[in-house]
Image (cartoon, helix red, strand yellow):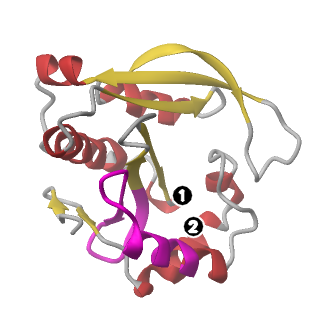
Amino acid sequence: MLPTLKTSRLILRPFSIDDVVNLTDYLGDVRVSRMLGPIPFPYTDKDAREWVTFNEKVDLSDTINWAIDDGTGLVGVIGAHGLAGSNSFGYWLGQPFWGKGYMSEAARVALAHIFNAYPTVDALRAHAFNDNPASQAVLQKVGFRPAGQSIETSRARPGAEIPSTRFELTRVQFLAEKLDTSDA
């Protein structure tokens, strides 16, 4: 069962059917979806329902995703997949909630949970498009270090090859830095 995690402002919780409207609205905003690789665009009600259903049935030994809730409903998503191998960490936040420190706050508690609950995860990897400096700043704020450059794609930018920075956070770095899991 996916645990619910809390900070003073946010709840990281399992998804529910009540999240469909916010998922559709926020991922239907090209300012959000263009910064994400695999997200369909335009994002539909059907896509949101499939996401909720996927997360209800997902194998938590490999994939863990939380709805980020500020008390008014879903405002974003955070999680990791490939926990038995590639260990990819990712997130997104609805545009009305940018600049509030929500993502670094959510990332701190999510990372603490992942490194505590998944002892075989030695490192987490992430990437952020180079035209998304805010996401790169969040990753660095919570302890990730640049680990190279790559070219990625986004379904919201058909045909585009997007320069991206890869990041990595090792368990050793995370524990050594004793990242504060309190609010950002």
When the figure is inspected, residue 29 is found, relative to residue 106, above or below; the finding is below
Q: Which residue is mark 2?
A: 26
Q: Residue at x 48, y 71 (%)?
A: 54
When the figure is inspected, residue 148 is found, relative to residue 163, above or below; the finding is above
Image quadrant where residue 30 sits: bottom right
Residue 62 rendering spot, x and y as whole percentages:
37, 51
Q: Please provide the residue range marked out in magenta.
A: 49-77
User: Is 73 contained in the magenta span?
Assistant: yes
Q: Nearer the viewer, residue 111 or 25?
A: 111
Q: Dot 1: few (<14), some (14–19), or many (≥20) neighbours within 10 Å? A: some
Image quadrant where residue 148 sits: top right
Residue 116 rendering spot, x and y as whole percentages:
13, 40
Q: Dot 2: few (<14), some (14–19), or many (≥20) neighbours within 10 Å? A: many
Is residue 63 visible from the viewing direction of this image? yes
When the figure is inspected, residue 16 is found, relative to residue 79, above or below; the finding is below
Which amino acid type is shown beneath numbered disc 1? Gln
When the figure is inspected, residue 92 is found, relative to residue 153, above or below; the finding is below
Residue 151 rendering spot, x and y as whole percentages:
72, 25
Q: Are marks 2 and 1 in contact (CB under 8 Å)?
A: yes
Q: Nearer the viewer, residue 137 or 15?
A: 15
Image quadrant where residue 118 sits: top left
Seen as rendered, the residue at the extreme right is: 159
Which amino acid type is shown beneath numbered disc 2? Tyr
The first of marks 2 and 1 along the sequence is 2
Q: Which residue is mark 1?
A: 95
